[in-house]
Image: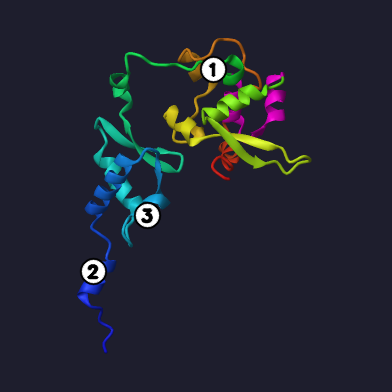
Amino acid sequence: MTGTQDPIERSLFEAPPLAEQERMIEAILFAAAEPVSLPELEARMPHGCDPAEALVHLRKRYEGRGVHIVRVGDAYAFRTAPDLGHLMRKETVEQRKLSRAAIETLAIVAYHQPVTRAEIEEIRGVAVSRGTIDQLLEMEWIRLGRRRMTPGRPVTFVVTEHFLDHFGLESARDLPGLKELRAAGLLDNRPLPGSLQKPDDEDEAATGQSELFED
């Protein structure tokens, strides 16, 4: 008996051509209601596929098109090209306006995560109502992070992939600074509590990201 593998048996374990892998990813992302991660793509695709490499080529093919593939946290999804977003607007839009307390709380979580409720209150200088936290949790813009290894082991809050996706961010590192927010008319000239300037030091920013997607 030789060690030569039967051609039919060998073909069962050979990965499909890269072009076919791109088609598979294209179909999965198109049908998915939520962004899909690389491990999820790999689990759905045939043995031996390399979704990471296929994604690189697929994303290039969609450059300059009406839709493109964007990274949302650790996952990927089809999204309308930013410059064509105005075409997708509906004539009637139901807006859910956040209170100033909710906006400040959300901003503190985004720029200082992972952060406890006590830390949010210290930065704002006033107590944070349970309703404010519950509203942001209900909107799935923040979620519970790891507990602090301090007395009482308080829970922390971090922003979600839904938050990143809503604002077109790949990660919280892409959050704009105060000058950019005010230039866009999203903030008035009153100083926000806690000096919410985005950290300049990449190590400091990385520390805040370490628990962003951990259970």
Residue 16 percent location from the top left of the image: 25, 59
- CA distance separating discs 2 and 1: 57 Å
* Tag 3–tag 1 contact (CB < 8 Å): no
Label 1 amino acid?
Leu
Point out which mark residue 98 bears: 1
**208 and 142: which one is in front?**
142
In the rendered image, which residue does mark 3 sit on?
42
Rate crowding at label 3 as few (under 14), some (14 to 19) or many (20 or more) other CA atoms within 10 Å: some
Magenta stretch holds residue 109: yes
Write the residue at 51% across / 27% down.
139
Placement of 191 over or under 33, stated as above or below: above
Instruction: Identify residue type, mark 2.
Output: Ser
Disc 2 or 1, which lies upstream in sequence? 2
Q: Is residue 179 above or below residue 213?
A: above
Numbered range of the magenta stretch:
104-126
Left or right: 27, with 196 as reference point: left
